[in-house]
Amino acid sequence: MDKPNIIEYSVFGRYALFTDPVSKTGGEKCSYQIPTYQALKGITESIYWKPTITWIIDECRIMSQIRTESKGMRPIKYGGGNDLAYYTYLHNVEYQVRAHFEWNESREDLAQDRNENKHYDIARRMVERGGRRDIFLGARECQGYVEACSFGEGKGAYDGMDMSYGIMVHGITYPDEAVREEEKGKMTVRLWNAQMKNGVLHFPRPEECTIRKVLRDAKEKRFVPGQNFRGLQEFEGCELFGFAKDFG
């Protein structure tokens, strides 16, 4: 693509839990103060996703003040029964997100589905409709809501402020999106030195993260048009290869 197709949206909710992995060892969970790249990518994929494309999160603007709230929970133990734990959530969150999609170069088998206008039109419409699937802010119990917006509009809680959040998880590279040869066929976790500038998080691209660790071997999922992937037939009001269909 010569010019990336950009979408901008606001996502908000009463609670969010962007789990710090360090807090998982004791059965209790504590949220990062800011969303991870992977969490925002998951939200964007809930708005619109196809295996043909890869979403790149460019920026995230913090719109509401960072507040936390702890709750007593009874999570299910792996051995059966329930346990007692405290989960620390972010309370009343709102973010503005700017993202764009690129072709998933690892999926040459889906090259025939690389129609830029089709995917951009659907993504834009899905933002206006609040997403295709349910939106979750880091955890299943944290319901989120999406609205279209212009990135930078309105007043953010940390406009004019710079803050550092130290080393934190950036995201996970799955086998079907691996670019580095040594990471193909593996699941890799990425970390970055999180910095907020003028109230905005400017995320590095996944391949730009220098702190990486291979977690385990993994297989990429295969998508077969007509079986588990609608492929060329999924588009809204777009002319493509001589036929059209509107899914409303």
Image (cartoon, helix red, strand yellow):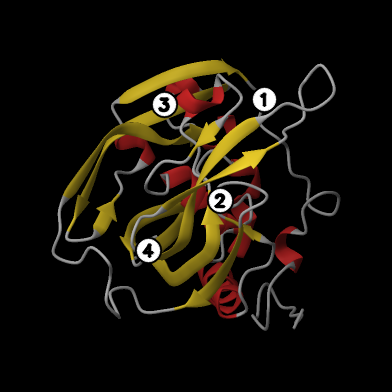
Q: Amino acid at mark 1?
A: Lys
1 or 3: tag closer to the N-terminus: 3
CB of mark 2 within 8 Å of CB of mark 1?
no
Q: Any mark on residue 180, and which?
A: 3
Q: What residue is disc 4 on?
A: 4
> What residue type is disc 3 on?
Arg
Q: Earlier in the sequence, mark 4 or mark 1?
A: 4
Q: CA distance from mark 4 to mark 1?
A: 29 Å
Q: CA distance from mark 3 to mark 4?
A: 22 Å
The crowd level at tag 3 (other Cα within 10 Å; few <14, some 14-19, many 20+) is few
If you read the primary sequence from the N terminus, does the residue marked by circle 3 or circle 2 appear first?
2
Determine whether 61 is above or below 218 in the image.
below
Residue 62 x %, y %: 33, 61
Q: Residues within 10 Å of mark 2 (few under 14, many from 20)?
A: some
Q: Relative to the observer, which residue lies in front, 88 or 173?
A: 88
**Relative to 19, 209 lies left or right:** left
Q: Which residue is mark 2?
A: 42
- Which one is nearer the viewer's eye here, 62 or 185? 62
Assign the C terminus to one quadrant of the image: bottom right
Front of the two marks 3 and 2: 2
Mark earlier in primary sequence (3, 4): 4
Residue at left offset 23%, top offset 60%: 199
Q: Nearer the viewer, mark 2 or mark 1?
A: 2
Of labels 4 and 2, earlier in sequence is 4
Q: Provide residue 134's location: percent of width, then percent of height.
A: 68, 62
| Residue 80, visible in the rendered structure | yes
Q: Amino acid at mark 2?
A: Gly
Quarter holding the N terminus is: bottom left
